[in-house]
Image (cartoon, rainbow, N blue to C red):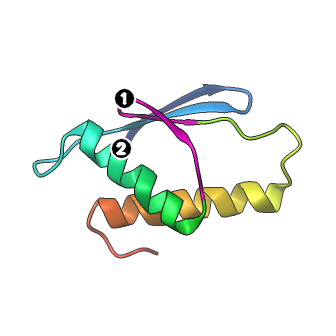
């Protein structure tokens, strides 16, 4: 995902740093990523240009995979690429 520049976390608590581009600042890109994910049914919080994900420890693997598929598709859209 070229829109994301760094991933950090501990356990099931992750921070995904959104990078900017020539057209968008990192904060604008993070906002667009948030709304693209919300339109697909995934909600999370932003801390500036950092996406914070904290799913429950009991999340089924299929739901976690689905959440990351949504995030990947939305990131591709915001980056101006066709979703995979």
Asked whether residue 1 is in view, the answer is: no
Q: Position of residue 75 (x, y in %)?
A: 40, 58
User: Residue 13, position in %: x, y?
Assistant: 67, 30
Q: Residue furthest top?
A: 10
Which disc, if any, is residue 30?
A: 2
Q: Residues within 10 Å of mark 1 (few under 14, many from 20)?
A: some
The stretch in magenta equals 42-52
| Mark 2 crowdedness (10 Å alpha carbons): few <14, some 14-19, many ≥20 | many
Indicate whether 13 appears above or below 5. Answer: above
* Location of residue 13 with respect to 29 vertically, above or below: above
Residue positioned most to the right: 58
Q: How many marks?
A: 2
Q: Is residue 28 above or below residue 41?
A: above
Q: Residue at x 29, y 59 (%)?
A: 79
Q: Quadrant of residue 62?
A: bottom right
Q: Answer with left or right where residue 47 lies relative to residue 54.
A: left
Q: Nearer the viewer, residue 79 or 49?
A: 49
- Kindly identify which residue carries mark 1: 48
> Farthest residue in the left direction?
22
Quarter of the image with the N terminus is: bottom left
Residue 75: which disc?
Answer: none
**Do the residues under discs 1 and 2 have CB atoms within 8 angstroms?**
yes
Ranked by sequence position, the earlier of labels 1 and 2 is: 2
Q: Secondary structure at mark 2?
A: helix
Dot 1 falls on a residue whose secondary structure is loop
Asked if residue 12 can be seen in this view, the reply is: yes
Q: Residue at x 12, y 52 (%)?
A: 23
Kindly identify the residue that appears in the image at 50 percent across and 59 percent down: 37
Residue 54 percent location from the top left of the image: 68, 35
- Taking the magenta stretch, the answer to whether it contains residue 24 is no
Q: Residue at x 30, y 70 (%)?
A: 81
């Amino acid at each position: 995902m070229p829109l994301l520049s760094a991933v950090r976390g501990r356990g099931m608590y992750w921070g995904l740093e959104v990078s900017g581009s020539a057209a968008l600042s990192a904060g604008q890109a993070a906002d667009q990523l948030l709304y693209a994910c919300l339109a697909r049914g995934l909600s999370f919080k932003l801390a500036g240009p950092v996406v914070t994900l904290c799913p429950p420890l009991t999340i089924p693997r299929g739901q976690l995979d689905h959440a990351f598929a949504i995030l990947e598709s939305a990131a591709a859209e915001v980056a101006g690429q066709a979703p995979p």
